[in-house]
Image: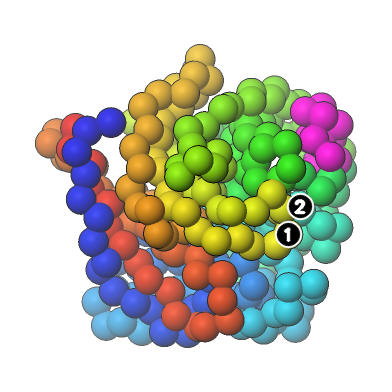
Amino acid sequence: MPPFTLELLFNIIGIGSASGLLYDGHTLLLIGDNSGFLYEYRVADQSLNHHALLEQPSANIPKSQKPDFEAIVSDDQNIYVFGSGSTEKRNKMVTLNKTTKAITATTDLTNLYLSMQSFAQIKPEDFNIEGVVRDQETWYFFQRGNGAKGQNGVFSVEVRDWELDFNMVYNAFKLPKIKGVRASFTDAIMVDDTLYFLASAEDSNSTYHDGVVLGTLIGTIDHVKMKLGKTKTISNSHKFEGLALFAKSEAQTEFLLCEDNDTDALTSGIYKLTLQR
């Protein structure tokens, strides 16, 4: 992995435990794993708006009740927000109109997530979807291996009906260790036909309980061969959970990252990671 720089761009007040983000050149869209809102942050004037993802949304939902929204994806018309599936209350996908941010559908992914668990032989207590990438007709679901068995993997899914009709392939990945603890997927995006992912390490073997943060790495996966590429530790103290493309050139690729601080504090740091090509 080439040299890198990592810098804090700004803090956003009003968002806690940020878990995913999108960037369109002017605006950041963010989700938090303990929040029932989609947040819209306009960089130019530093304004923050929020849009409901639930009937009775809250900015700080108790852990036992939270929908655990961990992944956000968009296409030309829609925004898709995914729950992690780590408990029965975390199986929803919320679809919003990309322009109005109004909810157009709320889908129960229980059948899909149970099929993933069965297909990959992952126990319910070890199942934890932390990133989703869409590439035309294929959806890549990143399973975070922060359970007892450390099962990191990627489900490649073709969907005809989210609740009833889908096909999948599963590829397991053994990620590097940070401070002696195996890293596990926290988010991913596609850039120039390459999957870029974040993976963090925590001193915990639970998908439910947080542990001491040991750091985060970035890496690549060939999405055709589904082979792990190079990786690079980018922090020994931060747990980065959101990854978005900021800018790219022949010389470098820049990403935006958001940090999950695993606290009730409604503040989220947005970082810029620059990788030299």
Which residue: 76% across, 53% down?
86
**How far apart are the two marked residues, 1 and 2, measured between alpha carbons?**
11 Å
Image quadrant for the N terminus? Answer: top left
Question: Magenta-highlighted stretch: main secondary structure?
Answer: helix
What amino acid is found at the position of numbered circle 2 in the picture? Gly
Question: Going by the picture, which residue comes out furthest to the top?
Answer: 225
Front residue of 49/201: it is: 201
What amino acid is found at the position of numbered circle 1 in the picture? Tyr
Q: Mark 1 touching mark 2, by CB under 8 A? A: no
Number of marks: 2
Instruction: Give, as a single range, the part of the protein colored magenta.
Output: 112-123
Indicate yes or no whether the magenta region holds residue 276. Answer: no
Tell me the number on the disc at residue 85.
2
Label located before the other in sequence (1 or 2): 2
* Residue 90, visible in the rendered structure: yes
- Within-10-Å neighbours for mark 2: few <14, some 14–19, many 20+: many
SS state under label 1: loop
SS state under label 2: loop
Tell me the number on the disc at residue 235.
none
Q: Position of residue 258 (x, y in %)?
A: 42, 62
74 vs 244, left or right, is: right
Question: Where is 12 relative to 86, above or below?
Answer: below
